[in-house]
Amino acid sequence: MNRLLSVIVNNRAGVLHRVTALFLRKGFNIQNITVGTTDNQAQSRMTIVLSDTDEETVEQVMKQLHKQIDVLKVTDWTHQPVVVRELVLIQVNSPVSTRATLTTLINPFRAHIIDVGRDTVMVEAVGKPEKVDALISLLRPYGIVELARTGVTALSRDTQTSEEMMRRTKENALYI
Amino acid sequence: MNMRIEPNAKPSLTGAQILVEALRKEQVEVIFGYPGGAVLPLYDALYECGIPHILARHEQGAIHMAEGYARVTGRPGVVIATSGPGATNLVTGLADAMLDSLPIVAITGQVSTAVIGSDAFQETSMIGISTPITKHCQQVRDVRQLAQTLKEAFHIASTGRKGPVLVDIPKDVAGFRAPFDYEEAVWLPGYQPNTRPNALQVRRLAEALTEAKRPVLLVGAGVLHAGAHQALLALVERYQIPVVSTLLGLGAFPGNHPLFLGMGGMHGSYAANQALSNTDLLVNIGARFDDRLTGNTAHFATSATIAHIDIDPAEIGKNVRTQLPMVADAKEALVALLAVSGSVGDYADWRRDLLQKGAEFPFWYVPDDGPLKPQRVIEFVHEVTGGGAVVVTDVGQHQMWAAQFYRFERPNEWVTSGGLGTMGFGLPAAIGAQIGRRDAPVVAIVGDAGFQMTLQELSVVVDYQLPLKIVIINNRSLGMVRQWQELFYQERYSESLMHCQPNYCKLADAYGIEGVLIENEADLQTKLRRALLQPGPVLVDCRVAEGENVYPMVAPLCGLHEMVGVKP
Ligand SMILES: Cc1ncc(C[n+]2csc(CCOP(=O)(O)OP(=O)(O)O)c2C)c(N)n1
Ligand SMILES: [Mg+2]
């Protein structure tokens, strides 16, 4: 099962290295790691997705992360109500003749064309990783020239966890 | 000059002077190190600073000395090396200290901040290299942060689960000036080791002890680091539970106590491994369930409830599933356990059975008329020193024989490289131990191969007039490797026989140390006895039987119940 960890660290040189060195040393599988500052400039948030990891390994990962002096907080959000988002940029072949269809195609994804060239356009989309996957497979037949995904970042929801919310999180858990 | 003098400003010091002041504040008694370009400013400040500096002959030697010192004194060992090759020579020692939880503060020089990243002369990314083998490491790019970083380094190295901390100081930072402020308390929100046991968990463990029928205590080096040996003894006396030790835990519980079953694990005693295999309550205090101790975990303590007391939460449940966890300092945990008035269970049958096994199947060897037996040499050293020496070993067969045949009765008198198994550790670690315990008899028991890895440190023995006794268990082979090849590789002795050896007595002579050759029992009684009892340093070349193996043994992938080579 994939796991989603949110890790608050000191925002200082070498911290990302410490964390990735730890994963390498312990042989943990990272599928995704994103880093950005938080509201507090002295701290960063790392959002980590571990692929195919059992309960005991997650516990060990969290404990090992905690041992790092620069790690302030580690939370396992796998089963929590969270919003998980990823941004993707896709440069796709699009001769003028297909542009109109392409636009209608990406519309339901709330994706935008953000750059237009002679033969290609660049599509930007934000969403859950599975939504991004779906968009990519839809555009593939047109010919993807280049593609960049940010990897996921996440935040926990306000905690009145309705049944509906929990159900959705379980779905998330399957994908992340 | 229109410099404004602020009357209340603290006088500013150079980075190098800040280091010296920090070492003074930390009451550092001795520094181990080796100078070079990037640490010239540091060495200039150390010159005549009053803190003794031991000039090792190789930086690896310096850090193993710091480890030996830390192991016997409980205080952080301080080591200094220059950038590049000096710093990379520390790597083995950092990894060793990391695995054996020894408090080390390593100071490395670095090229000046302006050229960091330019592949400058003797530039190496020590933060990159040391991150996975230190508890923490930090480069100081701003001299104003140096004092605080050093203070944090000592704090981190010597609290919680101890370990090595590296501080990398660029050469120019050592020359820049800043006020020296060492008063502010260390506050690291991401580092708050918990030492106090949870009351509920203490009660549960006490209940488990009452209910158990076949309990056993497994004691590791955590007991030594916490200074918990007396509390341990009190607990054992109260509950009358048999005790097994790990390799590194030897000395935490008196080896001559009737309830001591000996070391457990790969070359542990039969009784200890039987106890671990058949127990219904295994209480691990400050050990980390290393694979050399557990053997194949699928067969480890299969019918037991596992209780584990450890200062490091990450150790609990890491290798062995644990039902009764307790994150705490070993001493605080034991004191809390003693405070619970739990009734003592009835383990008389279990105890009797184990003690009988202990008496029936002790560590053994066959004394014969052939060449001197290595085990006999260790026994003899124990006899002559009355069990009162600090014993330091290298890595290999002689290390296991020392663990088996020297009975450790007191804490912190046993220094060995357990986790990393570092050949070359013995001599320099013994030097560090002797420097930490100037008046104690210190015996280094080393193999012929491992000794040759760091023998240049003999110079230090002479230089600082250390009364160290060095005993080479000379089997003219990489004995432990040879043993495995004999047992598991059809006696194909690939690169494990070392028949070309120096003349150790002449070597000793060249360094200005007395050399003694021991070949038989008569030599032991006369020459070795005299060598060990005389006041100065000595190097003893003990020619021992070459094909001797360490037994009993748990073969790889086997469980502890499957020992071979138990006394017939
Ligand atoms: C630095 C290092 N290299 C290799 C090894 C693997 N090794 C373990 S024991 C051993 C043989 C040690 O020989 P010696 O020092 O003579 O001790 P003996 O086993 O003969 O007592 C070797 C090569 C090691 N532990 N450390
Ligand atoms: Mg040998």
Image: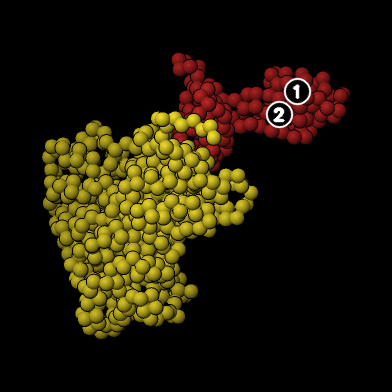
In the rendering, at what x and y percent does residue B402 appear? 29, 66
Image point 19% across, 53% down: which residue?
A: B242
Q: Residue at x 42, y 44 (%)?
A: B18
Q: Which chain is yellow?
A: B
Q: To which residue does mark 2 refer?
A: A89
Three-letter code for the amino acid on which mark 1 is drawn: Ile
Residue B393 x/y as whole percent: 33, 65
Beta carbon of the mark 1 residue lies under 8 A of ligand 1: no
Which amino acid lies under the numbered mark 2 shown in the image of this protein?
Answer: Leu
Of residue A87 and residue B4, the one placed in the foreground of this image is B4
Q: Is mark 2 within 8 Å of ligand 1?
A: no
- Quadrant hosting residue B148: top left
The answer to which quarter of the image holds residue B415 is: bottom left
- Compared across the picture, whether B360 is left or right of B314 comes to left
Q: Quadrant of the C terminus of chain A?
A: top right
Apparent side of residue B27 relative to residue A101 in the rendered image (left or right): left
Q: Residue at x 22, y 76 (%)?
A: B529
Q: Residues within 10 Å of mark 1 (few under 14, many from 20)?
A: few
User: The residue marked by circle 1 belongs to what chain?
Assistant: A
Question: Element type at marker 1?
Answer: strand
Let me know if residue B6 appears in the view.
Answer: yes
Disc number at residue A114? Answer: 1
Q: Chain of mark 2?
A: A
| Letter of the chain in red | A
Residue B338 at x, y = what percent? 16, 40
Kindly indicate whether the residue at mark 2 contacts the one at mark 1 (C-beta within 8 angstroms). Answer: yes
